[in-house]
Amino acid sequence: MNINPGESTIELKQQVHSQILFGPEINTHSSSSEQFLLSIYNSVQTSIFIVDVLENGDFSYVALNPTHERWLGISSENLRGKKPEDILSPDDAAKVRQHYTDCVQFGKTISYEQCLQFQGVPTWWSTTLTPLRNANARIYRLIGTSSKITPVKQVAQAKDTQTAQEQLLEAIAQWIRESLDLDTLLHHLVKEVRHCIGCDRILVYHLQPDDTCLVIAESTVTGNSCLGQQFPDSGLITQYQERNGRGCLQIVGDIYTSGLNSSQIEILDSLQVRANLAIPIWSQQQFWGLIVAQHCHQPYQWPEIEIDLLKQLATQIGIAVYQAALQEQVQNLKAQLEIQKQQHQAQLQQAQNFQALVQRLTEQIRDQQPETQVLQTATQQLAQLLQLSACYIEIYSSCGTQTTVKSEYATTTPKYQSVTRNVADWPEVYHSLLAKQHWQSLEIVPGWQPKLVVMTQLACPIFDNQGILGNLWLSRPTQEKFDEFEISLVQQVANECAIAIRQAQLTSATQAQLQKLQQQERRKNEFLRTLAQELRTPITSISLAAQTLESVLTPEGTLDIEIVPQLLQILHNECGRESKLINDLMTLTYLETEPTPPTLISIDLQTWLPPIVESFRDLTHCQRQKLHLDIDKSLPSLQTDITDLERIITEILSHACKYTPAGEAIAISATLTFDAVQLSINSSGLEIPAQDLPRIFEPFYRLMKNDPWTYSGTGLEMALVEKMVRHLGGSIYIKSENQQTTFIVKFPI
């Protein structure tokens, strides 16, 4: 067999095994072949050993290669002829013998991992056993190759241990959350801890009033049970309490070499303990007991991870002890409350009184009595039934950020009536109330005499299925809290108050809606009257002109040629005015219903706008007004309805020309804002009163009502402008201050 020095150890193993399994020299027991193989074994850096299978089925070692000798600390000469029990502990020898037996029984190569102790040091091995057969096909020898995997196993074990410990701590926390009783919790805990760290015994001691320790929980694999035993070990407890710490009470790797006194060694030895780890359990800063881990057969060096685990478990047990004490207190309180309920029949009378109060409130609400009367009845009757010092009801503002006291009853001078609170100033109170949960507290307030008085306050939310409305506050001059029965009765009253408040709000809203409808009706009637007047005015002028023209054209009349053109002009002007008014009314009606989308085309304001503005040049010149136009050169094209846009600009310019005083200026500008094209038409020397600004776009509203002939028009121009702007998707508003009035129209890009 040729061995390449560059081949891996695994390949070398395979070649060696192959030669051993199939080489003819081995089957004939050739000594030269064995020497050849041993020389190969000695050159390999993997641990290799050879085991003879005796005729009686027993096993004895034949040889080791130098690598195995170094790892085990045993020479090949000292090992030859020895059995597993001669070099291993009984437990390890039994495990090794079982692997050898399996290899012989199955007659094929097997691989396994195991932990063995050599010279007191535990070591993990990955081993492969290959059977060798003689000429009679009997397995007469086993050849094994082993690799140390202790570091890998230690890392894996550390991870597994850490994972198991985390799962254990999580399970214990879950048991605590599930409120398992303490005995059940400790029973589960000691069992799981022993499995987790692999020790022989886990104990939980509880310190008794006589300073003895009682074992109240145990998990063990030994036959010597300590459960229920008491140990007068006050010396250890006193020693630990003097330390006043949170570390370990006792870490003992070997009771015979750790410096324990004779009495302690005697006690531990009687329990078959060789290694001992004791951790104190504290609950509410009081020493409660110990959790103890023990190894019974051999010394053991306690790793930090196991010490830390027991420390954490001790903390969890302390929490469980405290929780169990709290649960016991709760049970006692519930029992006392139940006894009190049975003993105080007065609660029945109290419930009847509350039902009577609820009935009275229901009747008042049914009779639609004022909200203030219903709330006053509630506060007064509650104060008398529960012997309160004060009772009041507060209502939330529409935005929910403030509350205002609407009704109060107090045995002394009322101090909360009409008081307003900011909800944000009392977050700890209103957080619960806004969540529709009651709130209760004790408050210390100055009394009439030089002493302090404890007041119990209760607030119950007033709400319905539409939302929160307010809160019902009760104050009682005692330390006695409102019990659940009283709170439920108060909440019934709060529900009745909610009905009364909601009914009052609905009534108020109905009245407001009625007033709004009446106002709209008045505006409609005013509009119709104004419209009739506007329609009548041109007709009157037309009638007068027609009568005059008729009188001068009759045979009896005197023909005055000069007046005929004037009369015809009046007829023409008034017919046009009447026609424009009708057209404006039709357009306004069309825009107020459901108009069709505008026909949009792209226009360039730099070329489109100047001709429209210039058409007003002669008019402004005659009225001694200055006209300016400024267009931003960076304006993009505007998608719009060209007819409507021209009407909008023309009407606004006409309005500006009407009301801008002589000598003042009208400035038109077109600019680009963040997201829109903005058209501004400014009139200097004109300021509209603030109270008139909201009415500029109302139909038939004129700034100068006292001179309708000077400022002619249909009165619908600005209303039409506002409707057309919105129809094109834009917005319009007006600013007027410092003798400057500006119409601003924006169209989104």
Image (cartoon, helix red, strand yellow):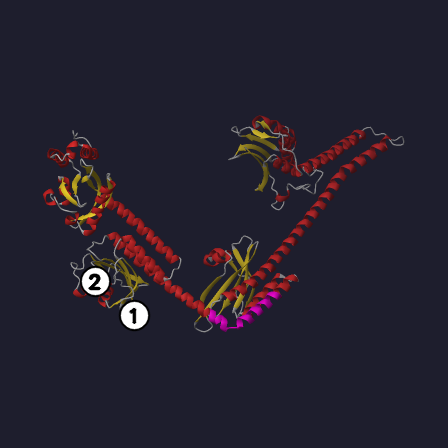
State the residue in front, 732 or 550.
732
- Dot 1 alpha-carbon crowd within 10 angstroms: few under 14, some 14 to 19, many 20 or more: few
Secondary structure type for disc 2: helix
- Please say if 483 is above or below 36: below
Which percent across, then down, holds residue 579?
74, 33
Farthest residue toward the top? 607
Q: What residue type is labelled 2?
A: Leu
Residue 209 got which mark? Answer: 1
Give the mark, 1 or 2, whose residue is nearer the N terminus.
Answer: 1
- Circle 1 — which element? loop
Residue 151 in the image: x percent, y percent? 22, 44
Q: What stretch is highlighted in magenta?
A: 338-359
Residue highlighted by disc 2: 268
Q: Do the residues labelled 1 and 2 touch (CB within 8 Å)?
A: no
In the rendered structure, which amino acid carries the disc numbered 1?
Answer: Pro
Q: Is residue 254 visible?
A: yes
Q: Furthest-left residue in view?
A: 77
Near-viewer residue (524 or 532): 524
Query: Is 342 covered by the magenta stretch?
Result: yes
Left or right: 447, with 571 as reference point: left
Residue 391 highlighted magenta (yes or no): no
614 or 375, which lies in front? 375
Identify the image quadrant of the C terminus: top right
Is residue 739 visible to us here? no
Q: Nearer the viewer, residue 721 or 32?
A: 32
Q: Distance between the residues labelled 1 and 2?
A: 23 Å
Query: Are there few (<14), some (14-19), or many (20+) residues within 10 Å of tag 2?
Result: some
Q: Which residue is drawn at 64% across and 64% down?
A: 363
